[in-house]
Image: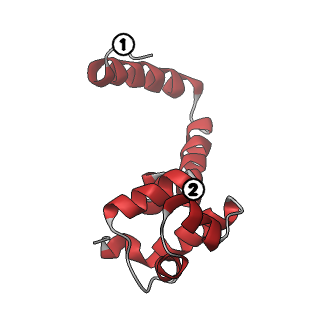
Amino acid sequence: MVSPFIKYDLGFILKSAREDKELSQKKVMELTGINNKTLSGYENNIAEPDFNTLMILFKLYNVSVDSLIFGEKQKDEAANEQYRMFRELPAKVKEDLAVQIKALHNKYCGKCL
């Protein structure tokens, strides 16, 4: 069962992603075997896809789980706000932050860069 936290936008996300890929419900049915009436139920929040079905659709539509939970627009807005705040900092503070970020990255991510 899909969490009630994300249910509200799930149908919209699925329909928008399908339309962004210029796929009809019939074409999705041909590609996945998911009945177009079932897909319509998902897109209208009448029914909830199981996890496997959701992953099939996400893969077909190239939709990330992040976009389902946070929404791409919200992620972009948050990143833009953080970047704006960073740009406004004095140069010395930016340098100090860069050193701290590098140290944290090395501590938690190793040398993955």
Q: Nearer the viewer, mark 2 or mark 1?
A: 2
Q: Secondary structure at mark 2?
A: helix
Q: Residue at x 67, y 70 (%)?
A: 24
Q: Position of residue 31 (x, y in %)?
A: 56, 59
Q: Secondary structure at mark 1?
A: loop
As shown in the figure, which amino acid type bears the numbered disc 2?
Answer: Tyr
Q: Residue at x 40, y 82 (%)?
A: 47
Q: Residue at x 62, y 36 (%)?
A: 87
Q: Is residue 102 above or below residue 63?
A: above
Location of the C terminus (image quadrant): top left
> Furthest-right residue in view?
22
Left or right of 84? Residue 94 is left
As shown in the figure, which amino acid type bears the numbered disc 1?
Answer: Lys
Q: As rendered, which of 57 and 29 lies closer to the eye?
A: 29
Q: Which residue has dot 2 on it?
A: 61
Q: As rendered, which of 80 and 112 lies closer to the eye?
A: 112
Q: Which residue has dot 1 on it?
A: 111
